[in-house]
Image (cartoon, rainbow, N blue to C red):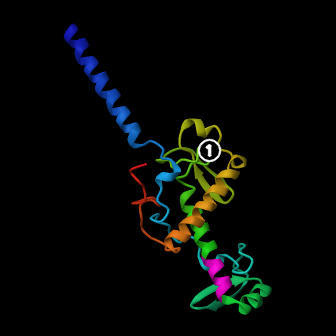
Amino acid sequence: MARKSLEISKVVVLATLFLALSSVALAQLPPEAVLLDKVKIPQTLTPEKIDPVTLEDCGDDAISWTWNDTEFRGAASSSKEFEKSPEKFAAAHKKELYVRNFMLAMSTIWCPITDEVTPGGRKTVDGHGLEWESCCSFCDEEMFPENFEEALVQLRKRGEVSYELSGGTYTEGASSPVEGAIDENV
């Protein structure tokens, strides 16, 4: 009987150790663990979806024009304004497009409640035009878009920093936006 009890104890200890190690591997990461110059952001939104002058969304029915092999869409007044200073508007448009693509990619892995990078597999919620994922059961209870205001601001700031660091370069085909972008020293 004592031997059977010892065997059961070993199994319990090994199972506990396995669960503990698994939880470390799947634990949330602090924001500073993400190297914003190395993130892999796909270009989900394309240039014609954002008016280059107002930087607002525009529909498929907006007028279109091409400048430097890029198709833009916007209001007729935007087209005329764009012609006055195309380099200025194209540069602001490129940054806004990257930041929005960053936000689309990263909201699915950045918990809007704890501001930590989540390993995935938790509750998802649509809010503010983005899909958000919680990092733990505690956050599941708080997953309401009205609780995401600060997260939205933080995500935009990180997108702007990433744009400055990476030059707004897109990467297609990565398994995750943080593939190769985690600082393991943090």
Q: Which residues are drawn in magenta?
A: 87-94
Based on the displayed image, in which of its 4 quarters is residue 88 positioned? bottom right
Estimate the x, y position of residue 137 in percent, counting from the top left.
55, 36
Task: Look at the picture and state if 152 lies above or below 3.
Answer: below
Task: Look at the picture and state if 161 lies above or below 13.
Answer: below
Query: Which residue is located at x 32 percent, y 30 percent?
Result: 17
Label 1: which residue? 113
Relative depth, front residue between 33 and 63: 33
Estimate the x, y position of residue 140 in percent, counting from the top left.
60, 39
Q: Amino acid at mark 1?
A: Ile
Q: Is residue 179 left or right of residue 151?
A: left
Based on the displayed image, in which of its 4 quarters is residue 178 positioned? bottom left
Give the secondary structure at mark 1. loop
Query: Which residue is located at x 63 percent, y 56 percent?
Result: 154
Q: Residues within 10 Å of mark 1 (few under 14, many from 20)?
A: many
Q: How many numbered discs?
A: 1
Please tell me whether the stretch drawn in magenta is mainly helix, strand or loop.
helix
Q: Is residue 81 left or right of residue 29?
A: right
Query: Which residue is located at x 61 percent, y 48 percent?
Result: 112
Estimate the x, y position of residue 4 in percent, counting from the top left.
22, 13
Estimate the x, y position of residue 2 in percent, counting from the top left.
22, 8
Q: Is residue 119 left or right of residue 141?
A: left
